[in-house]
Image (cartoon, helix red, strand yellow):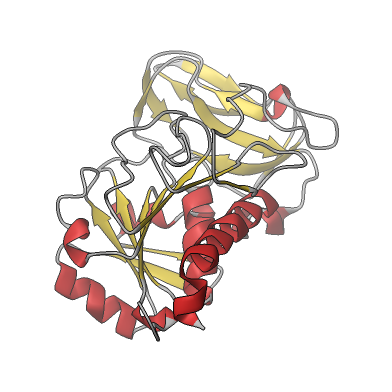
Amino acid sequence: MMNMKLIDMTVLIRGGGDIGSGVAWRLHMCGFRVLIAETSQPLCVRRKVSFCEAVYEGTASVEGTKAVLVQRLDDAGLCWEKGQIPVFVDPELQIVLHASPQVLVDAILAKKNLGTSIGLAPLVIALGPGFEAGKDAHFVVETNRGHCLGRILTRGSAEPDTGVPGKVMGIGSERVLRSPADGLWESSEDIGRIVRKGDMLGNVSGRPLIASIDGVIRGLIRPGIRVSKGLKMGDIDPRGIVENCFTVSDKALAIAGGVLEGILRHYGRALA
């Protein structure tokens, strides 16, 4: 690893939702070669800041950085030459592990381990609960809001999922939109629209999804997807700042900083 440069390092990120995309964006901006592995039907809420949207649209952009859906590792190289992030539909990592990444980041945020092991790459970093540092991954990054958000753990696990959303302007659970039923999600609403309490935002098999507070739609999952009752469908930001819907969040940046710290802790001397 001696005399390695950032441009030579490949970072594989499992999961291209808003947190994984925040990590990908920050590492890309720092000069790393980043690639993302996703499922065939991502259920992302903050779609305007999530590279996983490339699975549906072919491309996705976050704060000026473009991701492109690809199928071959050769295509990944072309993306990197153009300053882009390649996205693969490869949840089992059948393709992307052939890229021999120096770093693997589990950003699925499933609250449990869905198959990441410490031997998949020279450095494995896992985000949030469900992983034990030193056993499942070399490092775990705390994802719970509070004093330790973004902190690197070298032993033990992140705080367990509380099931309670972080408060914005004193509002917690009320700002989260959850499916009222099992079925097909239908909506014509756009992320970034100002809504009022009581507005109908769409329906699941005829059951309406109603805004419970005033604010701006910060996230809303893609219509036309089958959902289960209680699934998080979106969120309303009571601050009403439309621009925040289209930029990487403070939480994602804090977690991304923890990932960057982990990489530099592990590879710092080689990169010097």
Foreground of the two, 201 or 74: 74
Q: Quadrant of residue 11?
A: bottom left
The residue drawn where x is 64% and y is 49% is 150
Q: Is residue 252 left or right of residue 86?
A: right
> Where residue 19 appears, x then y in whole percent?
53, 49
Q: Quadrant of residue 214?
A: top right
Q: Report whether residue 26 is seen.
A: yes
| Residue situated in front as seen by the camera: 38 or 45 | 38
At 21% from the left and 49% from the top, the residue drawn is 93
Image quadrant where one finds the N terminus: bottom left
- Residue 211 at what x, y percent from top left? 67, 27
Q: Is residue 28 left or right of residue 159?
A: left
Name the residue nearer the viewer: 10 or 29: 10
The total of numbered circles placed on residues is 0
Residue visible at 70% across and 59% down? 243
Q: Residue furthest right?
A: 170
Relative to 225, say whether 21 is above or below. Answer: below
Q: Is residue 2 left or right of residue 154?
A: left
Position of 65 relative to 229 (above/below): below
Query: Which residue occupies the foreground of this view, 22 or 58?
Result: 22
Rendered location of residue 14, percent (x, y): 35, 49
Residue 31 appearing in the image? no
In the rendered image, the vertical position of residue 227 relative to residue 12, given as above or below: above
Q: Residue at x 61, y 21 (%)?
A: 163
